[in-house]
Amino acid sequence: MTSDNHTHDRELQQDARAWADFTGTKYTAALRQMGSPLAQGLLGERVSARHLIATLDQHAVIGARGGSPRLGENGFRSEATWRFDRETDFIELALITDMLRMFTPIPDSATPEVGSYSLKHTAEEFLAPHCSYVSNGRLIWAAAALGLPVADPGGSGPNLLIGVPEREHDYVRRMTGSGQTRPKADHHRPAGYEYLQSALARAAAGERIAGAWVRPAPVAVSAPFHDWLVLQVGRNDVIGDLAGDYVAGVRDSDHRVARTPDELLAIFHVVAHSPEAYDAVVSAIAEWMRTVPSAAPVRTEPIRGGEHDHGGWGAGAGTVERYEYRCPCGDGAIVEEHDNVPGFREHDVRIDCSKCDVEWAFVGGRSVRDWGLQPVAVNATT
Ligand SMILES: [Zn+2]
């Protein structure tokens, strides 16, 4: 046995002894819980029973600090005593802790805004069937022990506010809850969500998860078009309306973030919309390109196409390429063709859509393969 293993075992034993005393259970039963694969710490360190117990006394908000208990089974200011089943109580607290660990920590300066009672339901749905019931008190207990910001909204109720991002919580609630509208985009998915789902399944099957999960570093994605569009919210015109709908759609995970005009058009190719809303998209892209003349022209998604052999016209064989891309409005196509046949070499790209043919034009000075579009309105004098 290595000294690491030895230390680990001794800590487990000390924890089991503390938990046994605290919950009035047998040491061996407590040790069995400590050793469960589900209690090993799936997104971080193994949860310490001694730290959990100390939190109930020492925590700034929920700690008794020598006085009478401030947290009970039903929540804050609850006199309901803890109902320990002595078989899974510790494992459940460890699982609730891991569920809370998957969220991005909120900045210390931010005010917690997710209610413990709502979060308790989400934890229950997410952790099912490994943890069938999560009480309000245990959710608050695990959050406080983990060091998440915990705030008292005032009044006399049993619920506290917990410092996890509200949008990430909304995503998990809608992904796991019954009768919910599922999110259609994943930009609000917590960083540890997928890892924890798979680790839970593996741990439930008895697996020891080797190697710790590493929280991915936040990636600063440059999205100047998105940023510009957000700034147009509140304008009293069609672009202001579009921007308002767009921001609401991102907020509610109805669609992804549009870093570029191409991505905004792609969103409109899958989200139901009115013709007027599409016209507002073209106006917004035109204004964006006037504002930022260095902005890349629009490219659209490929639909079909490829290269095939051609027997040629007497001077040898060659190939013909034909590619189709969606047109900006989505009802037609951009057709790109290349004849690579001896004596007959032609390269051509055209808009095969009567609506887009009027509203869009190819940007000059580019090769056929490198075609790019901009709204005709970019160059219109208004
Ligand atoms: Zn079109």
Image (cartoon, grey):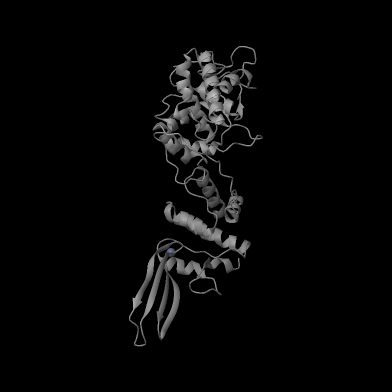
Q: Is residue 210 in view? A: yes
Instruction: Judge whether residue 155 can be spotted in this image.
Output: no
Q: Residue at x 56, y 62 (%)?
A: 286
Position of residue 114 relative to residue 261, above or below, is: above
The quarter of the picture where the C terminus appears is bottom right
Question: Where residue 73 appears, x then y in whole percent?
Answer: 50, 18
- Residue 28 x/y as whole percent: 46, 17
| Image vertical order of residue 1 relative to residue 291, above or below | above
Residue in view at x 53 percent, y 68 percent? 376
Q: Quadrant of ligand 1?
A: bottom left
Along the line of sight, the residue nearer the viewer: 150 or 24: 24
Closer to the camera in the image, 171 or 311: 311
Tell me where residue 24 appears, x and y as whole percent. Answer: 49, 12
Taking the image as shown, residue 75 lies to the left or right of residue 183, namely: right
Say which residue appears at 38% left-offset and 67% top-offset.
Answer: 305
Q: Residue furthest bottom?
A: 314
Q: Identify which residue, 201 or 369, lies in the foreground.
A: 201
Q: Is residue 218 above or below residue 294?
A: above
